[in-house]
Amino acid sequence: MTAPTTPYSSYLGDKDPLDSIKSSIDHIQTLTGDWPANRFERSYAPGKWTARQVLTHLAQTELMLGHRARMAVITPKYVAQNFDQDAWIALDAGLPGRAASDAFIAIARMNLAFFEGLSPAARATGLTHPEYGTLTVDWILHQLAGHQIHHIGQLQRVA
């Protein structure tokens, strides 16, 4: 199966997305595991999200993309909806950093198990997205893997 091209393909490169996700989950768990509460409130650059916000965004992205993939597998001709990441981040502004990290780790592990259990035919299942057009569940998997790597770099700068 040829790897799909996503906005985060450059981060994933030729790595297997399932292996990459396993590694990313473990990396974030180890990286943030002993952080004091105030570390989560640091930003990786002036005017950018704090580590807490990055982790919240990662958890929210796992929710949304995991939902899309599951819906595509069980819903013929599924059409995904856009989501505004800034509007979403505001919804969970009160989530503490440790809870954001724990949420990401738990949801990402659940998504990983879901993706690992898919057949090649299920991964090839199509869906439509208003911004990206016709996609597959495999595209979502590759998008998630690259997206995680992208944000790990930001969290490493906070560390």
Image: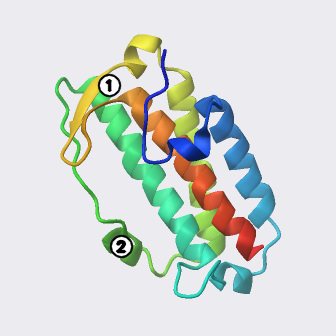
Q: Which of the 4 image quarters holds residue 44?
A: bottom right
Residue plotted at (37% across, 50% down): 64
Q: Residue 70 vs residue 150: left or right?
A: left
Which element type, helix, strand or loop, lies under badge 1? Answer: helix
Q: Amino acid at mark 2?
A: Asp
38 to 98, vertically: above or below: below
Residue 21 placed where, x, y %?
Answer: 63, 40
Q: CA distance from mark 1 to mark 2?
A: 28 Å
Residue position for label 1 = 73
Residue visible at 48% across and 64% down in the picture:
57
**Residue 129 occupies quadrant:** top left
Q: Nearer the viewer, residue 109 or 150?
A: 150
Task: For residue 107, say whether it is visible.
Answer: no
Q: Position of residue 116 (x, y in %)?
A: 57, 24
As drawn, is 93 to the left or to the right of 15? left
**Is residue 1 positioned above or below 13 on the image?**
above
Could you tell me the amino acid type at mark 1?
Val
User: Horizontally, is 86 left or right of 141 in the view?
Assistant: left
Q: Which residue is mark 2?
A: 86
